[in-house]
C-alpha cells in the first residue's frame, strides 16, 4: 500500500507557510462551527447523535490541534525541537547536553549558586535532619526551622515585617492576587507582566486594566480617571522583565500609588541578586524603603538556587495569607532541603557582593558586543537578561539549533509566548560566565545570524 502523498513536498517555504496556516484555520473553524451550532441562549443543546467529538476528546481541543500544526510545520521544515533538552549535570555557566559541553545561557543561575558546595551541603544536612518533605501544609504538619529562618531572612532582605514562602513561584502570584482581591477591585498591570499575574487576576474576578510598558505616566492617567470607581486598587510591576531585560522607574510608581491610595506589588523574580550593589533588588537599586512597596514577591528558583516563591510585607499581609490563602493553607509546605538551600544561597549572596558586581560586568560586556555586531537587543539594560531579536519564530528556532552545534546553548522564545514578529533568543547572564565565553558566544551569534536569511 502506498503512503499518502505529503501535501508540503516540493513547496517553497512561503507556500508551506500558507498551507500550514490554512490547515490550522480550517481545524479551528471546524471547532468554532461545532460550538456555534450547539450553542443556544448561552447554553449548549445537543441533539441527534449527542455531544460532538470536539467536546469529549483531548486530541480535539483547539489548542492541541494548533500544537499539532506547529509540529507538522517543524517536521516538514526539518527543524529540530529545541525544547526539553536533557542536561547531564549542573546547569551553570557550562552544561552538558548529549555528551557535549555547552556554554550555557539558558538557566536563571544568575550568581552561580546552583551547585555551590555550601548550598548543596545545606540541602544535604536538612535531608539528614528533617527528611525530604513535610508531607502536608504547615498549619497541619507543623514548622521546620529552615522554613521560618528563610522567611525571616527574606523579610530582612526587603526591610519589611515578615514573609511567607510558597512551594511555587507561579502559584505565589496566582493565589496571593486571586485571594486578596475581588469583583469590586481594580488591578492594573504592566503590558508585559508575567502570566502568573494574569492568572491571579482572572481568579480574583477583579477588573483588569493594562498600561504601556514601564509607563508610569499612563498609569497615573488611568488612575486619575478610574480610581474612585473601585474599592481596592492594586498595581503590579516587575523588577526586571524576563523577556526584555529592562526595569521600571520604581520611585515614580511608588509616588503614583501613594497619590492614588493604591497598593503596589513588585515581582522581583529576575531582579533579586541582580539589581542593587548587594543584590537586594530594585528597591536597593533606587534607594526605596521596603515599606514603600506593599507586596514584595520573589522566587527561590533563580538567584537562590532552590524552588518556590514568597511574599514579603507588613505583618497583617503575611499573617492573612498564612491563615487563609488557599495556595498556602491547602498546599504542602516547602521541603526542608529546599528552604535550607535557599537560605544558604541568600547568605552567600549577601557575604559575597562581588558576585553581583561580576554579573553586571558580564551583562554589560555581552550587551556592548552584541550591539557592536548589529544584533537587535531591544530595551535590555544589560543586567541579567539580554534578548537577541530574530523576527520570525522559525528563525529563532533555527538560530538556537545552529548555536547549539557551535557549543552555545540558548533557548528561543517563540509565538505564542511573544507576538509573532517579536521572536527572540533569550540570553541569561551568570556571574560564573567568563569574558572569553561571552566573546565567543556573541561572535558565534553574529556569524550564525548572518547565515540565516529566512523569511520573517
Image (tube, rainbow, N blue to C red):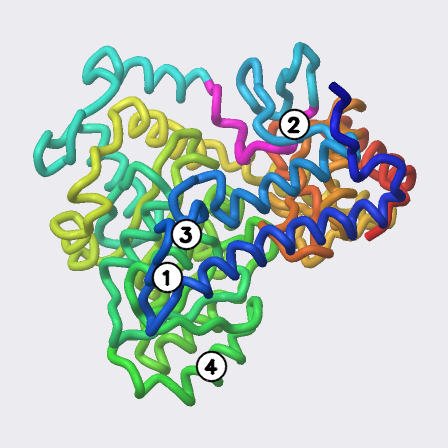
To which residue does mark 4 refer? 220
Which residue lies at the image location 30% right of the left edge and 59% below the top edge?
Answer: 203
Q: Is residue 177 above or below residue 140?
A: below
To which residue does mark 1 refer? 265
Q: Earlier in the sequence, mark 3 or mark 1?
A: 3
Q: Nearer the viewer, mark 3 or mark 2?
A: 3
Which residue lies at the image location 77% right of the left edge and 52% below the top edge?
Answer: 391
* Rendered image quadrant of residue 182: bottom left
Q: Is residue 255 left or right of residue 2?
A: left
Magenta-highlighted stretch: main secondary structure? loop
Q: What secondary structure is marked by label 3? A: helix
Q: What secondary structure is marked by label 1? A: strand
- In the rendered image, residue 422, in percent from the top left (x then y), is placed at 70, 55
Residue 110 visible to the viewer? yes
Residue 156 visible to the viewer? no
Q: Earlier in the sequence, mark 3 or mark 2?
A: 2
Q: Marks 3 and 2: CB-CB under 8 Å?
A: no
Q: Which mark is residue 196?
A: 3
Q: How many marks?
A: 4
To which residue does mark 2 refer? 104
Label 3 – label 1 distance at C-alpha = 13 Å
Q: Is residue 97 left or right of residue 265?
A: right
Mark 4, other Cα within 10 Å: few <14 / some 14–19 / many ≥20:
many
Q: What secondary structure is marked by label 2? A: strand
Does 107 lie within the magenta span?
A: yes
Q: Which residues are magenta?
A: 103-116
Amino acid at each position: 500500500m502506498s503512503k499518502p502523498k505529503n501535501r508540503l513536498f516540493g513547496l517553497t517555504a512561503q507556500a508551506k507557510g500558507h498551507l500550514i496556516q490554512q490547515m490550522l484555520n480550517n481545524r479551528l473553524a471546524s471547532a468554532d462551527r461545532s460550538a456555534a451550532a450547539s450553542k443556544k441562549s448561552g447554553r449548549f443543546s445537543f441533539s441527534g447523535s449527542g455531544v460532538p467529538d470536539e467536546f469529549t476528546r483531548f486530541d480535539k481541543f483547539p489548542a492541541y490541534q494548533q500544537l499539532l500544526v506547529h509540529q507538522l510545520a517543524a517536521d516538514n521544515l526539518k527543524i529540530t525541537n529545541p525544547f526539553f533538552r536533557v542536561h547531564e549535570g549542573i546547569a551553570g555557566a557550562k552544561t552538558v547536553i548529549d555528551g557535549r559541553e555547552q556554554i550555557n545561557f539558558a538557566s536563571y543561575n544568575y550568581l552561580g549558586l546552583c551547585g555551590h558546595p555550601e548550598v548543596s551541603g545545606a540541602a544535604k544536612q536538612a535531608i539528614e535532619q528533617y527528611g525530604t518533605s513535610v508531607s502536608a501544609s504547615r498549619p497541619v504538619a507543623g514548622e521546620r526551622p529552615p522554613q521560618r529562618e528563610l522567611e525571616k531572612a527574606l523579610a530582612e532582605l526587603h526591610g519589611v515585617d515578615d514573609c511567607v514562602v510558597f512551594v511555587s513561584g507561579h502559584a505565589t502570584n496566582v493565589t496571593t492576587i486571586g485571594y486578596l482581591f475581588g469583583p469590586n477591585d481594580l488591578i492594573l498591570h504592566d503590558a508585559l507582566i508575567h502570566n502568573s499575574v494574569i492568572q491571579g487576576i482572572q481568579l480574583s474576578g477583579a477588573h483588569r486594566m493594562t498600561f504601556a510598558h514601564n509607563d508610569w505616566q499612563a498609569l497615573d492617567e488611568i488612575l486619575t480617571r478610574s480610581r474612585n470607581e473601585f474599592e481596592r486598587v492594586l498595581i503590579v510591576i516587575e523588577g526586571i522583565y524576563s523577556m526584555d531585560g529592562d526595569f521600571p522607574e520604581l520611585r515614580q510608581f511608588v509616588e503614583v500609588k501613594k497619590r492614588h491610595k493604591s497598593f503596589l506589588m513588585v515581582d522581583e523574580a529576575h531582579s533579586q541578586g541582580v539589581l542593587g550593589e548587594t543584590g537586594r533588588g530594585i528597591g536597593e537599586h533606587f534607594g526605596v524603603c521596603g515599606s514603600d512597596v506593599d507586596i514584595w514577591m520573589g522566587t527561590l528558583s533563580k538567584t537562590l538556587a532552590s524552588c518556590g516563591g514568597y511574599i514579603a510585607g507588613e505583618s497583617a499581609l503575611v499573617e492573612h495569607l498564612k491563615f487563609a490563602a488557599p495556595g498556602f493553607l491547602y498546599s504542602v509546605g516547602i521541603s526542608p532541603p529546599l528552604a535550607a538551600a535557599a537560605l544558604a544561597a541568600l547568605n552567600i549572596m549577601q557575604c559575597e557582593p562581588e558576585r553581583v558586581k561580576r554579573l553586571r560586568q558580564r551583562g554589560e560586556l555581552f550587551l556592548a558586543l552584541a550591539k557592536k555586531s548589529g544584533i537587535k537587543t531591544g530595551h535590555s539594560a544589560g543586567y541579567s537578561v539580554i534578548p537577541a531579536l530574530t523576527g520570525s519564530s522559525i528563525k529563532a528556532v533555527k538560530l538556537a539549533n545552529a548555536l547549539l552545534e557551535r557549543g552555545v546553548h540558548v533557548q528561543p522564545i517563540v509565538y505564542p509566548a511573544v507576538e509573532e514578529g517579536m521572536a527572540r533568543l533569550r540570553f541569561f547572564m551568570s556571574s560564573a560566565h567568563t569574558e572569553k565565553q561571552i566573546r565567543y558566544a556573541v561572535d558565534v551569534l553574529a556569524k550564525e545570524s548572518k547565515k540565516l536569511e529566512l523569511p520573517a
